[in-house]
Amino acid sequence: MSARTFEAGSDGWCRHRLLALGVDIGDLVEAAGGFLCDRARAGWDVTVVATDGVTSRSLAILGVATGAVTDDIVTAVRELAPGGAVAVAPDLLLRNARLRHELARLAGDGSVEILVWGSELGPGFDPVGHPVSAAARAFKSHALTAAGRMSGDGHTETLYRVRPAALRRLRAV
């Protein structure tokens, strides 16, 4: 793994940056809310961009920012500094060829960690269990309620780390 670098946030502090790209805020909170909350509590600058255009109280509860929904989310990915991370919804990954291409490039050079939440997508996507902290479980429970979702056990969230060749095999159907 390459050395991590930091990027100055809006407050002037240098910190890691995590960009989460999704379609539905409720799905995002359900699948990766604890992970996002733990990263934010660890000092990461966490921003969520959801293509459904909804800004959500759920995200504020988790301690993450809501990014501007633009037509070109690929630009937001390109602006990540080395050492950052991208977490992406599998449905967005499958239907956006430009995003897939950019993530494949980043996965190839190893400068950015790329994770997918949701169900397993096949070879090239390595499961990574994230043990959710007690604090993140509590925040996630409230965030799920705000999103109109049922709260689950949530002690571990499984995300999938993307290997470079995996993105070349995905095609929209």
Image: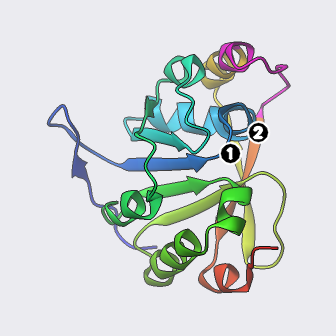
Q: Which residues are drawn in magenta?
A: 142-155
Residue toward you, 100 or 106 = 100
Q: Is residue 154 magenta?
A: yes
> Outermost residue toward the front?
71
- The numbered disc on residue 90 is none
Q: How many numbered marks have been drawn onto this rendered protein structure?
A: 2
The kind of secondary structure element at disc 1 is strand
**Quarter of the view holding residue 94:** bottom right
x then y, percent, for residue 155: 77, 32
Q: Which residue is mark 1?
A: 130
Q: Quadrant of residue 36?
A: top right
Residue furthest toward the left?
Answer: 12
The type of residue carrying mark 1 is His
Q: Crowdedness of circle 2 by 10 Å Cα count: few (<14), some, many (20+)?
A: some
Mark 2 — residue? 156
Q: What residue lies at 20% left-to-right and 35% top-to-bottom?
A: 10
The residue that appears at 60% across and 75% down in the rendered structure is 97
Q: Amino acid at mark 2?
A: Thr
Would you place residue 173 above or below residue 64 in this image? below
Quarter assignment of residue 157:
top right
Q: Are marks 2 and 1 in contact (CB under 8 Å)?
A: yes
Ranked by sequence position, the earlier of labels 2 and 1 is: 1
Q: Main secondary structure of the magenta part?
A: loop
Q: Is residue 79 above or below residue 19?
A: below
User: Compared with residue 149, is residue 142 higher up or lower down, i.e. above or below?
Assistant: above
Q: Specify whether 164 is left or right of 153.
A: left
Q: Pinpoint residue 143: horizontal percent, then vertical percent.
A: 65, 19
Asked if residue 101 lies in the magenta stretch, the reply is: no
Quadrant containing the C terminus in the rendered view: bottom right
